[in-house]
Image: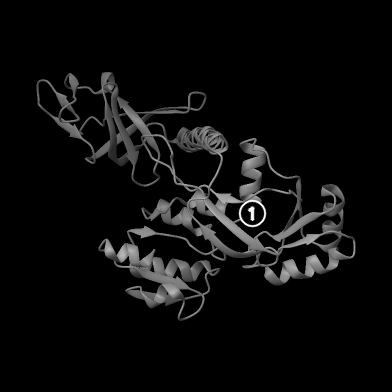
């Protein structure tokens, strides 16, 4: 990744918990810190002021990424995605409980006693994994009651970070294992890369290859299912964010804020408030002082008499007109002296 980014002209700063990490050997600069130390992460972000932050390791204080996004930094793919994908508990609950994706039977355990109960629930054989690990470290299969203690000890030894918890999963005798990488687009459908095959031995990663030969119907079924669930998740996420934005702004009706024009349509101007990232709309009918129309070629809102023009990215001041929680809608108006 570092080499590819440098070929594109990027300056790359690699960060890890130890000196001489592979990425550091080809990066422009590097930092050695405890990746679980949130203050240390804050310090290097403030020091380098990156355009893009790419989380790559599991043992990192992922909660800080939400703060960086609010500060205007771009986290790839997003702070929420990093928090989900680097924690087996979060990603499993999202898949099973929120998206209704079929998964193996599972439970969590934070002690040996809870592990015994979870094994009883899932049945034997079952698989035990640390909630945070890499390359299969700490993973084992429990086939008999005598394996439980060994599995618990091995899981704790293989755990990364400061999360001492395991997941117990019912055993699935599968034909093969794949990773289906996707590229989510803002204004179009999800793209799917050719499937990647994997080989593990005793829970330890050995090799991967692309493409993995698959039955065409099975691959199409997996892509369609993933695309549908991704659309549901994106919609639910947007609605949740909008609900919290409106709730936050409920007691700020009548207050003035500085913002940036984030979108323009025939209906009006969308504005994102700089200080809190809440987005609302100034309806065209509420733009007093002139009759404004949408110019599709310039992608601008223009006043017929005054020729006053509003375009994407323009700074603008707004007053909060209303915050409708049931509609998840924020309405703004222009200040009298805008």
Q: Which residue is mark 1?
A: 88
Per the image, label 1 sits on a secondary structure element best described as: helix
Q: Is residue 222 left or right of residue 89?
A: left
Give whichever of 112, 322 is nearer the camera.
Answer: 112
Q: Is residue 198 above or below residue 223?
A: below
In percent of the image, x 57 and y 37: which residue is there? Answer: 218
Give whichever of 273, 238 is nearer the camera.
Answer: 238
In the rendered image, is residue 40 in sight?
A: yes
Q: Position of residue 286 (x, y in %)?
A: 28, 21
Q: Is residue 112 left or right of residue 249?
A: right
Location of the N terminus (image quadrant): bottom left
Callout 1 crowding tier (Cα within 10 Å): few <14, some 14–19, many ≥20: some
Give whichever of 68, 331 is nearer the camera.
Answer: 68
Q: Is residue 172 left or right of residue 133?
A: right
Q: Quadrant of residue 217?
A: top right
Q: Is residue 58 above or below residue 222?
A: below
Q: Is residue 82 left or right of residue 204?
A: left
The residue furthest bottom is 19
Q: Is residue 229 above or below residue 137?
A: above
The residue furthest right is 145
Location of the C terminus (image quadrant): top left
């Amino acid at each position: 990744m570092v080499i590819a980014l440098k070929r594109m002209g990027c300056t790359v700063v690699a960060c890890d918990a130890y000196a001489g990490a592979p990425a550091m050997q080809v990066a422009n600069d590097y930092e050695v810190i405890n990746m679980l130390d949130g203050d240390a992460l804050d310090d290097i972000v403030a020091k380098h002021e990156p355009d893009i932050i790419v989380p790559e390791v599991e043992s990192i204080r992922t909660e800080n990424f939400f703060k960086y996004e609010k500060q205007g930094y771009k986290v790839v793919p997003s702070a929420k995605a990093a928090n989900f994908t680097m924690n087996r508990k979060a990603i499993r609950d999202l898949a099973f409980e929120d998206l209704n994706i079929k998964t193996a039977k599972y439970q969590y355990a934070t002690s040996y006693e809870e592990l015994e109960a979870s094994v009883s629930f899932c049945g034997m054989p079952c698989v035990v994994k640390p909630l945070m690990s890499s390359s299969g470290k700490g993973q084992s299969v429990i086939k008999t009651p005598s394996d439980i203690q060994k599995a618990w000890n091995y899981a704790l030894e293989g755990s990364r970070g400061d999360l001492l918890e395991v997941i117990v999963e019912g055993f699935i005798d599968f034909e093969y294992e794949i990773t289906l990488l996707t590229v989510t687009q803002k204004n179009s459908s999800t793209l799917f890369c050719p499937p990647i095959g994997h080989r593990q031995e005793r829970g330890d990663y050995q090799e991967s290859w692309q493409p993995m030969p698959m039955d065409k119907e099975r691959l199409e079924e997996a892509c369609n299912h993933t695309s549908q669930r991704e659309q549901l998740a994106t919609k639910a996420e947007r609605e949740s964010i909008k609900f919290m934005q409106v709730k936050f702004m409920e007691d700020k009706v009548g207050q003035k804020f500085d913002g940036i024009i984030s979108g323009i349509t025939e209906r009006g101007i969308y504005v994102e408030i700089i200080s809190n990232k809440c987005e609302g709309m100034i309806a065209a009918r509420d733009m007093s002082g002139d009759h404004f129309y949408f110019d599709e070629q310039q992608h601008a809102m223009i006043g017929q008499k005054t020729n006053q023009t509003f375009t994407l990215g323009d700074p603008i001041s707004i007053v909060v007109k209303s915050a409708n929680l049931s509609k998840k809608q924020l309405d703004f108006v222009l200040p009298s002296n805008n």
